[in-house]
Amino acid sequence: IFDVLVVGGGPAGASAAVYAARKGLNTGVVAERFGGQVADTMSIENFISVKATEGPKLVAQLEEHVKQYDVDVMAGQRAAKLSTDNLINVELESGATLKARSVILATGARWRNMNVPGEAEYKGRGVAYCPHCDGPLFKGKPVAVIGGGNSGIEAAIDLANIVEHVTVLEFADTLRADDVLIKKANSLNNITIIKNAQTTEVLGNVSRVTGLRYIDRVSQQSNELTLAGIFVQIGLVPNTEFLTDSAVTLTQFGEIDIDNKGATSLPGVYAAGDATTEPFKQIIIAMGSGATASLGAFDYLIRHAQQ
Ligand code: FAD
């Protein structure tokens, strides 16, 4: 029986595990892939106090830090179900069930992909998902933003300060973003918005993105844009499907609803990072919320759990 079982081994899970272990709690981490989204990241320049690093390097450091403590890391395992009796049970896809007095959910999120040819091939080589992270890499160059919802238009406004020109491609005939954002985007002379545009292919020269192809859904005409970067902003999907039938409350977007101590609706179950209602999705924020959830769980254990 674990005192604290962390589900997820990204920055939020790693931070939660270190904080729990340092309280002398019997701590386990179950993670499909240790490192999470960080493992897919090329350059990281906003992890404060580290001027620049690379995803795989930071993952190795996270692992090293966690393993410095007596933490049971179970990698390559997926949680399939969460239930409670007098303890909290995390059922794994392998069929095993882990039991814990408290659980920290840190299963992160995944960016929704366009699923067009070239996207996967040029990921990290011009195809990007996070304007806060990768915007400065395209300084003075032309980029596109795919998606005209709030995140797409926010990304376009953000990028317009840095890059040469932003073309927003929206599939529908209207933008779904808030009016105030649309007005702001329309007021900037280096943003062009194209509606009814279906991206069909990411173009590149083997080493980097050079543009994209889209179809005008009204005229059915195929067009090409010359670009250095493509920011895909069509949604961030929390990895919380396994909680659908549990007593943990999710929002309409599938995010785990947490309070300011990281507590979910289910006593003893805490959550942190991109899988939650935490508004901004960044490494440093995920680590902070992992620490919060872990201290929240500790607070819960000293008040409620029997030894
Ligand atoms: P994740 O990193 O998503 O980790 C989730 C963990 O849960 C993983 O271990 C995963 O395997 C595991 N998991 C998921 N489902 C299950 C399950 N059912 N059972 C068991 N385990 C499960 N942020 C920055 O601050 N700076 C950057 O430069 C930056 N660049 C980025 C570049 C890219 C390409 C991407 C995709 C993201 C980038 N981000 C960046 C965002 C940052 O990576 C995330 O905000 C951060 O990783 C979130 O941490 P997390 O621990 O909440 O989730």
Image (cartoon, helix red, strand yellow):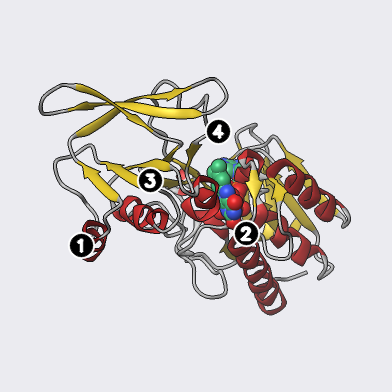
- Distance between the Cα atoms at labels 4 and 1? 31 Å
| Residue 81 makes an appearance in the image | no
Label 3: few (<14), some (14–19) or many (≥20) C-alpha neighbours in 10 Å? some
Identify the element where label 3 is drawn: loop
Q: Which residue is mark 4?
A: 125
Q: Which residue is mark 2?
A: 46
In the image, 217 versus 271, the foreground residue is: 217
Q: Disc 3 vs disc 2: which is toward the camera?
A: 2
Closer to the chain start, of discs 4 and 1, is 4
Q: Which residue is mark 3?
A: 235
The type of residue carrying mark 1 is: Lys
In the image, 150 versus 52, the foreground residue is: 52
- Distance between the Cα atoms at labels 4 and 3? 20 Å
The mark found on residue 183 in the picture is 1
Closer to the chain start, of discs 1 and 2, is 2
Q: Quadrant of the N terminus?
A: bottom right
The mark found on residue 268 in the picture is none
Closer to the chain start, of discs 4 and 2, is 2
Q: Quadrant of the C terminus?
A: bottom right
Is 164 left or right of 74, judged from the image as shown? left
The type of residue carrying mark 4 is: Arg
- Distance between the Cα atoms at labels 4 and 2? 19 Å
